[in-house]
Amino acid sequence: MRVAAVVVSHGNARELERLLPALTPQVDELVVVANVPGSVGGLTAPARLIENPRPLGFAANVNLGIRETDAELVCAVNPDTVPRSDAVAVLREFVERTPRCGIAGPQLVHPDGSWQPSRRRFPTVGGTLVRRTPIRRVVEPSPSHYLLDERPAEPVEADWMLGAFLVLRRSMLDELSGFDEGFRLYGEDIDLCYRAAKAGWERWYVPAAIVEHAYAAVTDRRFFTRRTLWHWRGILRFVRKHPERLRAL
């Protein structure tokens, strides 16, 4: 199977200088979406460049890039990631031999090489309130909610995975109409995985594929920022779309 990669840059020219040399040799097509001016710098990679006349949300930008490709698999890539030299190949080979795998995610590590939990359970009301409000100052978030204490060595199925670096099967994307562009930033990865699950597509965590991720985790450290508002907007949209999750305590 051929693999295309879509990278969305929102002023991330410096990050692209590390990402693109590592990513380009691993894919058959590469699209870079410049969401705001100054997002690519001196782009030298053999990539299709899309420059937006006005900024779009992350989901809309990924969909835009996907439409410019035709490979059977599409890798949605954050600019703050750097894949190991075989990461895409490992994910591609896994999807090729797993017919119902619609989404495959790698093991993420911090820039210092330490493990980064990225395989998650679908949100619950209790877990979200503890994780995303000041309640977490007095109540410790349950490791089981985000699988923060599990480090499988072999591929395992997942509810959802962080959207920093995901390989997506095009037939699944076509069936689901891609990412929901109503999500500006945050929640679009959970929503896609949830809709994939409801449609019978599997989501797999493949730890043999390793990707460095400089995870900012702004909403984990601070309660009241613009990103916090975007995060809660994403949560509310997810609940409106999938009200049955309100029964998941």
Image (tube, rainbow, N blue to C red):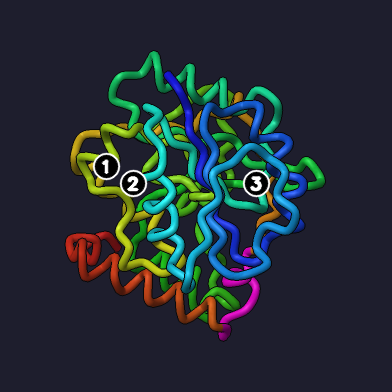
Q: Residue at x 54, y 72 (%)?
A: 139
The x, y position of residue 223, in whole percent, is 57, 81
Q: At label 1, which amino acid type do we have?
A: Ala
Name the amino acid type tagged 3: Gln
- Residue position marked by numbered label 2 in the rendering: 193
Horizontal side of 138 relative to 72 (left or right) equals: right
- Is 184 part of what is drawn in magenta? no
Amino acid marked by disc 2:
Cys
The image quarter containing residue 226 is bottom right
At 65% from the left and 73% from the top, the residue drawn is: 221
SS category of the residue bearing label 2: helix
Disc 3 designates what residue?
116
Q: Are marks 2 and 1 in contact (CB under 8 Å)?
A: yes
> Looking at the image, which residue sits at the far bottom?
224
Residue matched to label 1 = 196
State the image quarter where residue 152 is shown: top right
Q: Is residue 237 above or below residue 143?
A: below
Name the mark nearer the viewer: 1 or 3.
Answer: 1
Q: CA distance from mark 1 to mark 3?
A: 24 Å
Q: Which residues are magenta?
A: 217-225
Q: Nearer the viewer, residue 14 or 126?
A: 14
Residue at disc 3, secondary structure? strand
